[in-house]
Image (spheres, coloured by chain):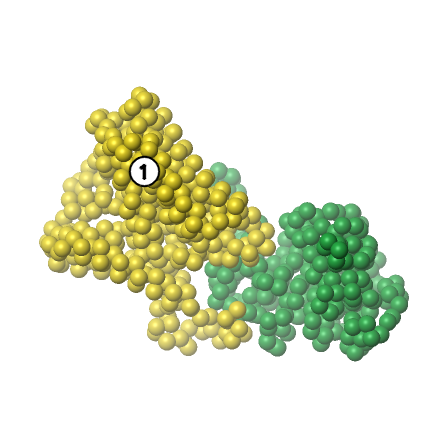
Amino acid sequence: MSEQTAPASAEELVPSRHSPAQRVQHLLHRNPALSPLIVLVVAVLVFGVVSENFLRPQSLSLLVQQMAVVGALAVGQTVIVLTAGIDLSIGMAMVLSSLVMVKLNFDHGVPGPLALLIGIAAGILTGVVNGVLVTRINLPPFIVTLGTFSIFTAVALLYAAGQTTALPDDSFLLWTGETIRIGSVGITWGVLLMLVLYAGVGFALRNTAWGRHLYATGDDRDAAELAGIRTKRVLLSAYVVAGVTVGVAAWILCGRVGGADPNAGLNYNLMSITAVVIGGTSLFGGRGLVIGSLLGALIVQVFNSGLALAGVDPNYQVLATGILVILAVAVDQWIRRVKA
Amino acid sequence: MSQTEAQERSPAAHDTGPVLEAEGLVKLFGRVVGLRGVDVRLFPGEVLAVIGDNGAGKSTLIKCLSGAMTPDRGTIRVDGREVRFGSTQEARAAGIETVYQTLAVAPALDIASNLFLAREIRRPGFLGSALRMLDKKAMRDQAEQHIKDLGISTLQNINQSVETLSGGQRQVVAVARTGAFGSKVAILDEPTAALGVRETGQVLRLVQDLREKGLGVILISHNMPNVFEVADRIHVQRLGGRAAVISPQTHSMQDAVAIMTGAAEVPDDEQSLR
């Protein structure tokens, strides 16, 4: 209701009355993925100048492979953040899902494809658990996923008895780590799988009623409900979609680490949130794009690889990520204050 | 619309019978009586204002009519057919659209998307059925046509996001929603409560446009000048019951306030008005 003083007719909204800063604000407001894109391009150029190795095809393809797991998880995280929620358990859910796949396959001799499907089903189940707690018992997503984070961690450690399982090189589950060559650039199937995830969820958000309803629900849940949207169903669906991306990310993780490690998931929770936030999606819900999260995950990896190649103390990578997150949220706050 | 027009139009419109009719609505909240047997009749092409002091049962009445509450006793008929709403969705399906005091718009979505929120159009064929793709162009075109039909001039760009609109323009979008999709009844709960003079004028004009389109409009308002400007008849709620139905032509604002507060009593004789 803060817009009460806004001009009453569209004629008074002619952009010529706006200052340059306001125009930038409007531009960023209309295009949520624009600011991360600018940051990414600038970062790539700067690191390309600083270290000559950075722009080599090998460095770049390694960079993309390193961000594939976070990138895939960030798809699910974006969908949840768009509903004004947050998922603190997503990384551990992925580890749990990958343990199911690997242990079924390796310990119990279940064929790879079947083990994969059951593992993805386990990922979906983690999403359903979160979603049911959020929508049926009406608990805040932050609390629900903080709790399930601990639960999934404990279940993963108990299930694996704290042990890492390594798969034989020819295992079906490691297919996501295999490289396909396009000219001099090598790219893994895992990276392609991640891109498919982005394309699919991006399409659904943009072109289906489900997408509209998800944005409307995250924007203002009461208003969406009054408009006739069944918001509980929409929220639950967001967690189920996140569960699917958890399963796919788990498969990509298998390819990255060559098996399953119950201790691998700790950082992924926060890294996926970092990617979403740097990608311009608002933590208040209703605003943002999945493609932004892809850019966000890339930005973090570009800083990490770039600083490493420049020979800087690795602790500065963490510092840089922290500054980026705070800057991104500050920019989001500024954009949200856009005036008519 | 002038008075003579209203008098000429009214009988013709009323020949068709009420579009929304409620009889003997009772709603109890524990030992508290919310509604004590209220009758409402709304005809197509008229604006029925509902006024009343706080606690008179206005909101309860509106919630019963819009499906947000189920009355404990009494019947509701739409076009003569008895209905029983379990939810606002069911009321909407029967052609009753409600604009709530808290705006039911999604700020980040554009005007067209808001008009079609929760009833999006899908593309024909494979793209729509298998891929569930939205027909954005059809929605834009229809939204544009609808805005034009209602004679709304304040909304110029249908692709503008609602949050960039003023409070009055947002309310126009919310009210315009009620007139789309072949609805028969629009219930507007304090649509001008938070608006300035000029914006109030825009919304009231839209209310009259909805009447021109043949909708029955129920307008809940505290603002007597607004009520007397657009209402054809005024339903006065008092202490959970209907105190009277009066006409702006035969009664003054002072009369209305007096009936509302119990200072004056008039026979509740709805028939004499028609």
What type is the residue that disc 1 sits on? Val
Name the element at disc 1.
helix
Q: Give the letter of the green chain.
A: B
Which residue is at the far top?
A109
Label 1: which residue? A95
**In what quadrant of the picture does the N terminus of chain B appear?**
bottom right
Question: Residue at the location (84% across, 58% down)?
Answer: B15
| A99 relative to B23, above or below | above
The 10 Å Cα crowd at callout 1, few under 14, some 14 to 19, many 20 or more, is many
Q: Is residue A189 visible?
A: no
> Which color is chain A depicted in?
yellow
| Quarter-of-image position of residue A111 | top left
Q: Is residue B30 visible?
A: yes
**Closer-to-camera residue (B174/A15):** B174
**Closer-to-camera residue (B159/B100):** B100
Question: Residue at the location (53% across, 73% down)?
Answer: A4
| Quarter-of-image position of residue B208 | bottom right
- Which percent across, then down, holds residue A77? 38, 48
- Which percent across, then down, holds residue A275? 31, 52
